[in-house]
C-alpha cells in the first residue's frame, strides 16, 4: 500500500488579511538618486546620512547581482517601491495608532504580548515604525529602546549611531547590503548600559502591508560591558500577486562579558524575497546566542554571522527552516573565530516538504590568532516526500592547528516503520507525521520564546495538515 | 466465549514472497493464546498483518475483530478498536517523550482529553508495576533505550493503553531472568485489570509457566500446522518443533 502525498495550502488567514494600501504616501518605484534624495528629505536626514545613502547607491549600481544560491529572477528590483509612509507618526501610546494598523498588530498578538511578557515593543508598518514603547522601570535603568531615525536626531545618541551604523555590515558586503544602505527606513536602536541585565525581552515586530514594496529596516543594538539583553524580532506580510522584498540589516555590538540573545521568527508570505543581513561582533568573554525560525518567504538568503573578537567570546546558533511548496530557503550561519579560546556551537534543523527546497550553509573560520578555540556544527535535515530537496554546504577554514573543529550532518526521511509504529498506537498517519516532525524540531522550538514556540508548533500542524492521501 | 479475533484463511505476501498461507486462528474474549514456530515461520508476519502493517499485502482471506471485517482498515483504526502489538524492535522517536506520547495515544484511543495530572498519576502507577524509574517518562520515546528497556516500555504502553487484544511479539526474548519476571508481572497486571485477550509469540518457557495458557498454535512455513491446549506449548518447548512439523 503506497501512500499518496497530497498537500493543501495552509491556512494563512491569520497573516494574509490586509488593508488597502492607498492610505500611505508612496514614493515612485525604482532606485535613483532622486528617489534617494526624496527619502532623505522626507526623513530630514543629517548630512552624513544623505551622503551615506548616495554612496551606497553607487556601490549598489556597480555590484553584480548574487549569482549563487536561490534564484532572485522573479524579483523586479527596479520596480520595488522602496518607501511608503503610513498615515501616522510614531506613537508611544497604543491608543493613538490608527485603527487599521492597530487591528493588524492586535490580530498578530501585539501588544497583548507586551502587556504579558515584554519590557518593550516596537512595531513597524511598511517603512516606518508606528509604535514604540518601553516600560518605565526599563527606561529608568538607562536602557534605550527607540526608533533608529529618532535616535539619530537625538544629540545623546547621534554620535554613537554615526560611529556604528553600517560599520559591521559595510555596503560593499553584497548588493543587497548596498541597497539597504541607500533606502533603509525604520528599525530600532537599542542601547544597554554597563552591568544592566534586562531580564525580560524587548520585541520588534515588522509588518509589510503594501504590495510590490520593500521593507528595509535597520536594527542597531549596542550592549556595554557585562550587560544582558534578549531581543525578539517577528516578521510577517500578507500575500500579494507582486513579489515583495525584505532587505533588512541587523548590527549587534556585544561588549566585554555581555550576552545577547537574538530570537527571530520569520513568517513572510510565500512570495517575499527575504534577503536579510545580520551580524554580531563579540568582545572578550561576551556571548551571542541566535535563535532563528524561518518559515515564510519565497526565497530567503539568511546567514547570521558572528565575529568572536575577544578572548573567550562565544557564539551559539540554533535554527530551524521549514520549506514548503514553492519555497527556496537558503539559510545558514557564519562564525569567525578571531581571538584565542573562543567557542561556537551551531545546531540546526531543516524540513522540506511538497517540493520545497532548503539549503543550509555553515561557514566556520578560525584565524591564526584563535588558538585554543572550539567549534562544533550539527545540522539535520528531514525530507517529507520524494519531491523535496535538502542540501547541506559546510565550509570550514582553519588557519591554526591549535583548535578543535567538528561538523556533523544528517539527512533523513520519515520511515514507514515509524509511521506504522505510531499508527498502531491509535494516531492517524497525519498525526504520526506531525508528531515526528514536532519531535525533530523539539530541541530548537524549546529555545524559542514560549509564544513563538506555540506558534511554531501551530505552523507545523498547519503545514502537516492534509499531507497524506 | 465469544470470538474477538478471527483470521480466516489468511494469505499474506511481501515483496512477492508468500509468507502466510491460509492461516486461520481464533482468539476468544479474555483468552490467552500462544503462537509458536521455528524462525521464519511467519509469526511476526501474522502479528503485523493483524495490526495492519502496510508492509504486508493480504492476497487471500479475511480478518475479523469482534465480528467485524477489518481486513481493509488502517492500523490506527484497528488500534482504536482495541488491537495492540508490542514490537520486537520499537522505533526511536526523537524529541517526543514517552509520557507525552502515551498521553497523546491514550487521547486518540479514547477520543477524550486527558488531564496532565490524571495522566501522570496513571503513568506512575503503571511504572511501579514494572519497576521502572519515573524518570523514564521524560526520556525520548525509545531513544537510547537498551533492548530490555524497550521491551519494558512496550509493556508499559500495554498497561496504559488497555487494548482488548494484545499481540506480544517476542516481548520476552533477549531479556535476563529478572526482566522476564518484570514483563510477566506486567502481562499479569494487564490480564487482571483489563481482562483483555492475549496472543503471545514466544520461545520462552519461563514466561509460559507464569501464564495460564488457553490455547497453542504452531506455525510453520506460513501454515498453522497444529493447534492444541496450553499443555502443547510446554510440550513443544521440551521436545522441539520437529515432530509437529513433520506431520504436515
Image (cartoon, coloured by chain):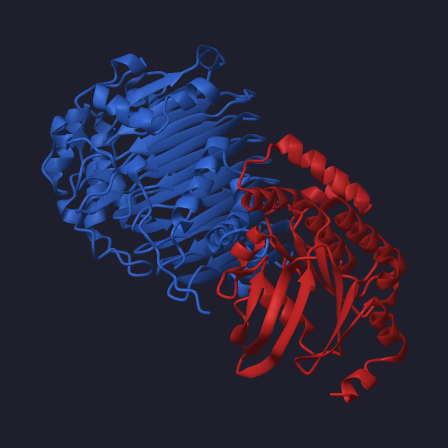
> According to the colouring, which chain is red?
B
Q: Quadrant of the C terminus of chain B?
A: bottom right
So how many labels did they put on this image? 0
Residue at image position (60%, 32%) is: B115
**Image vertical order of residue A18 relative to residue B83, above or below:** above
* Location of residue B28 in the rendering, given as x and y in whole percent from the top left corner: 69, 60
Residue at image position (84%, 56%) is: B179
Residue at image position (47%, 15%) is: A138
Q: Is residue A10 left or right of residue A213?
A: right
Q: Nearer the viewer, residue A45 or B159?
A: B159
**Image vertical order of residue A44 relative to residue A135, above or below:** below
Locate residue A314: give its quadrant.
top right
> According to the colouring, which chain is blue?
A
Locate residue A208: give its quadrant.
top left
Residue A393: in sight, yes or no?
A: yes
Residue at image position (65%, 52%) is: B164
Q: Nearer the viewer, residue A381 or B107?
A: B107
**Image vertical order of residue A427 relative to residue A45, above or below:** below
* Location of residue A263 in the rendering, given as x and y in whole percent from the top left corner: 46, 36
* Location of residue B25 in the rendering, given as x and y in whole percent from the top left corner: 66, 70
Q: Is residue B84 left or right of residue A317?
A: right
The residue furthest front is B1
Q: Quadrant of the N terminus of chain B?
A: bottom right
Amino acid at each position: 500500500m503506497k501512500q499518496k502525498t497530497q498537500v493543501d495550502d495552509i491556512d494563512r488567514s491569520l497573516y494574509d488579511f490586509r488593508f488597502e494600501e492607498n492610505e500611505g504616501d508612496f514614493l515612485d518605484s525604482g532606485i535613483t538618486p532622486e528617489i534617494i534624495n526624496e527619502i532623505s528629505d522626507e526623513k530630514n536626514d543629517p548630512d552624513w546620512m544623505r551622503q551615506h545613502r548616495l554612496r551606497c547607491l553607487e556601490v549598489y549600481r556597480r555590484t553584480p547581482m548574487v549569482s549563487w544560491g536561490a534564484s532572485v529572477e522573479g524579483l523586479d528590483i527596479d520596480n520595488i517601491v522602496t518607501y511608503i509612509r503610513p498615515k501616522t507618526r510614531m506613537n508611544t501610546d497604543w491608543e493613538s495608532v490608527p485603527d487599521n494598523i492597530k487591528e493588524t498588530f492586535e490580530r498578530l498578538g501585539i501588544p497583548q504580548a507586551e502587556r504579558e511578557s515584554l519590557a518593550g515593543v516596537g512595531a513597524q508598518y511598511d517603512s516606518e515604525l508606528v509604535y514604540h514603547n518601553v516600560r518605565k522601570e526599563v527606561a529608568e535603568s538607562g536602557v534605550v529602546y527607540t526608533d533608529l531615525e529618532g535616535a539619530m536626531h537625538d544629540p545623546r545618541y547621534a554620535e554613537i549611531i554615526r560611529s556604528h551604523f553600517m560599520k559591521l555590515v559595510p555596503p560593499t558586503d553584497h548588493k543587497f547590503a548596498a541597497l539597504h544602505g541607500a533606502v533603509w527606513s525604520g528599525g530600532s536602536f537599542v542601547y544597554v548600559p554597563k552591568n544592566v541585565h534586562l531580564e525580560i525581552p524587548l520585541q520588534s515586530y515588522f509588518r509589510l502591508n503594501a504590495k510590490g514594496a520593500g521593507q528595509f529596516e535597520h536594527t542597531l543594538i549596542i550592549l556595554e560591558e557585562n550587560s544582558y539583553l534578549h531581543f525578539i524580532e517577528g516578521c510577517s506580510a500578507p500575500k500579494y500577486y507582486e513579489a515583495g522584498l525584505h532587505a533588512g540589516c541587523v548590527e549587534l555590538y556585544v561588549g566585554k562579558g555581555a550576552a545577547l540573545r537574538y530570537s527571530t521568527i520569520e513568517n513572510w508570505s510565500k512570495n517575499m524575497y527575504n534577503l536579510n543581513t545580520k551580524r554580531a561582533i563579540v568582545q572578550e568573554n561576551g556571548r551571542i546566542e541566535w535563535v532563528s525560525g524561518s518559515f515564510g518567504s519565497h526565497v530567503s538568503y539568511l546567514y547570521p554571522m558572528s565575529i568572536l573578537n575577544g578572548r573567550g567570546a562565544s557564539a551559539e546558533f540554533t535554527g530551524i527552516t521549514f520549506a514548503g511548496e514553492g519555497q527556496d530557503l537558503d539559510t545558514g550561519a557564519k562564525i569567525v573565530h578571531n581571538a584565542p579560546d573562543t567557542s561556537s556551537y551551531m545546531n540546526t534543523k531543516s524540513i522540506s516538504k511538497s517540493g520545497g527546497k532548503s539549503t543550509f550553509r555553515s561557514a566556520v573560520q578560525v584565524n591564526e590568532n584563535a588558538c585554543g578555540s572550539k567549534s562544533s556544527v550539527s545540522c539535520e535535515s528531514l525530507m517529507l516526500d520524494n519531491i523535496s530537496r535538502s542540501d547541506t554546504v559546510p565550509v570550514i577554514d582553519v588557519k591554526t592547528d591549535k583548535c578543535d573543529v567538528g561538523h556533523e550532518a544528517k539527512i533523513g526521511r520519515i520511515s514507514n516503520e515509524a509511521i506504522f509504529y505510531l499508527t498502531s498506537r491509535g494516531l492517524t498517519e497525519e498525526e504520526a507525521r506531525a508528531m515526528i516532525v514536532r519531535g525533530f524540531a523539539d530541541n530548537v522550538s524549546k529555545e524559542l520564546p514560549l509564544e513563538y514556540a506555540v506558534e511554531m508548533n501551530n505552523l507545523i500542524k498547519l503545514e502537516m495538515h492534509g499531507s497524506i492521501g | 466465549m465469544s470470538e474477538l479475533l478471527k483470521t480466516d484463511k489468511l494469505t499474506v505476501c511481501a515483496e512477492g514472497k508468500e509468507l502466510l498461507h491460509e492461516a486461520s486462528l481464533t482468539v476468544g474474549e479474555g483468552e490467552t493464546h500462544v503462537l509458536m514456530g521455528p524462525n521464519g515461520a511467519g509469526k511476526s508476519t501474522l502479528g503485523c498483518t493483524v495490526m495492519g502493517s502496510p508492509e504486508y499485502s493480504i492476497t487471500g482471506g479475511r480478518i475479523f475483530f469482534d465480528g467485524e471485517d477489518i481486513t481493509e482498515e488502517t492500523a490506527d483504526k484497528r488500534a482504536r478498536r482495541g488491537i495492540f502489538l508490542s514490537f520486537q524492535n520499537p522505533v526511536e522517536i526523537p524529541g517526543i517523550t514517552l509520557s507525552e506520547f502515551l498521553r497523546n495515544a491514550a487521547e486518540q484511543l479514547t477520543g477524550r482529553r486527558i488531564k496532565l495530572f490524571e495522566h501522570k498519576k496513571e503513568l506512575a502507577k503503571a511504572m511501579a508495576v514494572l519497576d521502572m524509574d519515573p524518570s523514564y517518562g521524560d526520556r525520548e520515546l525509545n531513544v537510547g533505550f537498551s533492548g530490555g528497556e524497550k521491551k519494558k516500555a512496550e509493556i508499559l504502553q500495554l498497561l496504559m493503553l488497555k487494548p482488548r487484544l494484545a499481540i506480544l511479539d517476542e516481548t520476552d526474548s533477549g531479556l535476563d531472568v529478572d526482566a522476564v519476571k518484570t514483563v510477566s508481572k506486567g502481562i499479569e497486571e494487564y490480564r487482571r485489570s483489563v481482562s483483555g485477550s492475549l496472543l503471545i509469540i514466544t520461545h520462552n518457557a519461563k514466561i509460559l509457566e507464569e501464564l495460564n495458557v488457553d490455547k497453542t498454535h504452531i506455525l510453520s512455513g506460513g501454515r498453522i500446522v497444529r493447534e492444541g491446549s496450553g499443555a502443547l506449548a510446554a510440550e513443544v518447548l521440551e521436545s522441539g518443533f520437529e515432530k509437529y512439523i513433520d506431520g504436515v
